[in-house]
């Protein structure tokens, strides 16, 4: 599981990070790197048991105190620096990706669990968990992004439809996010645009840039 160098992120993530506040930019970058790593494990899995073992390595590593984890992996080291005490949201991400390995079919229930789990880290950096409206909006944006992005990677129409429906349902909870959360507002808006168009790539077409800019400026 050792990788000394972090891999490049998709353009929509790079754009979102550029619009994110300084306080949350580095933690978010690490979380998106973990997401890419987990996605690659799932994409390369041909034997479910082996895929589960690789994902379990991450779950167990994240469940350990930071000073007891292996060192030398760019993502895991970054988690130790930026996610101490908040690793549960990242474990939810691992559990979400595992659904693609263990579920025989990705139906509506599985799609909803995937979107909620993969996008849970959007709200994990809020300093005050009692900021319920903000947390709710961030969770909705994370779910919307997670489902829209994943819908492009599945080949079965029914699974694609389940992911799109899951993201569309979560979209109803989105709202204005300003300040340091503008980058996540960008991803939520791009995810919503993708879902409205049947699961197109998030940066597809000239309208993507306008959608991102509007979300960054107005927070929604």
Image (spheres, rainbow, N blue to C red):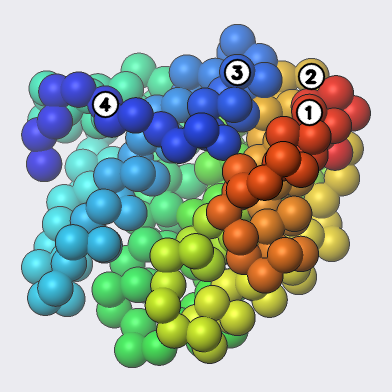
Which label's residue is closer to the chain start, 4 or 2? 4
The percent coordinates of residue 70 (x first, y second) are 11, 30
Residue beneath label 4, please? Answer: 6
Which label's residue is closer to the chain start, 4 or 3? 4
Q: Residues within 10 Å of mark 3 (few under 14, many from 20)?
A: few
| Gap between marks 4 and 3 measured at Cα | 17 Å
Nearest the camera: 210 or 135?
210
The residue depicted at 60 percent of the width and 10 percent of the height is 22
Q: Is residue 92 above or below residue 213?
A: below
Residue beneath label 1, please? Answer: 213
Q: Residues within 10 Å of mark 2 (few under 14, many from 20)?
A: few
Instruction: Verify CB contact (< 8 Å) between mark 4 and mark 3.
Output: no
Determine the image quadrant of residue 8: top left
The residue depicted at 40 percent of the width and 88 percent of the height is 105
**Left or right: 132 as drawn, with respect to 77:** right
The residue depicted at 66 percent of the width and 41 percent of the height is 187
Which label's residue is closer to the chain start, 3 or 1? 3
Please name which of the two marks, 3 or 1, marks the residue nearer to the observer: 1
Instruction: Verify CB contact (< 8 Å) between mark 3 and mark 2.
Output: no
The percent coordinates of residue 117 (x first, y second) are 51, 59
**Left or right: 34 as drawn, with respect to 70:** right
Q: Residues within 10 Å of mark 1 (few under 14, many from 20)?
A: some
In the picture, the quarter occupied by the C terminus is top right
| Gap between marks 4 and 1 measured at Cα | 27 Å
Q: Which mark is residue 179?
A: 2
In the picture, the quarter occupied by the N terminus is top left
Which label's residue is closer to the chain start, 3 or 2? 3
Please name which of the two marks, 3 or 2, marks the residue nearer to the observer: 3
Q: Residues within 10 Å of mark 4 (few under 14, many from 20)?
A: some
**Left or right: 69 as drawn, with respect to 186:** left
Q: Which mark is residue 18?
A: 3
Instruction: Verify CB contact (< 8 Å) between mark 3 and mark 1.
Output: no
């Amino acid at each position: 599981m050792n990788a000394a160098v972090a891999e490049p992120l998709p353009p929509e993530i790079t754009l979102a990070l550029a619009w994110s506040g300084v306080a949350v930019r580095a933690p978010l970058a690490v979380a998106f790197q973990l997401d890419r790593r987990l996605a690659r494990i799932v994409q390369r899995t041909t034997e479910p048991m082996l895929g589960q073992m690789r994902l379990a390595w991450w779950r167990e590593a994240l469940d350990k105190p930071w000073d007891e984890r292996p060192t030398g992996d760019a993502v895991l080291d970054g988690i130790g620096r930026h996610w101490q005490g908040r690793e549960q949201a990242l474990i939810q991400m691992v559990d979400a990706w595992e659904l693609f390995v263990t579920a025989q079919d990705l139906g509506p229930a599985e799609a909803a669990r995937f979107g909620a789990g993969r996008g849970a880290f959007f709200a994990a950096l809020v300093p005050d968990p009692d900021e319920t409206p903000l947390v709710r909006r961030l969770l909705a944006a994370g779910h919307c992004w997670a489902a829209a992005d994943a819908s492009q990677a599945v080949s079965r129409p029914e699974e694609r439809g389940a992911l799109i429906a899951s993201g569309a349902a979560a979209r109803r909870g989105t709202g204005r996010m300003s300040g340091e959360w503008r980058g996540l507002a960008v991803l939520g808006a791009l995810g919503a645009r993708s879902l409205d168009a049947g699961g197109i790539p998030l940066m597809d077409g000239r309208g993507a840039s306008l959608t991102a800019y509007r979300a960054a400026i107005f927070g929604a």
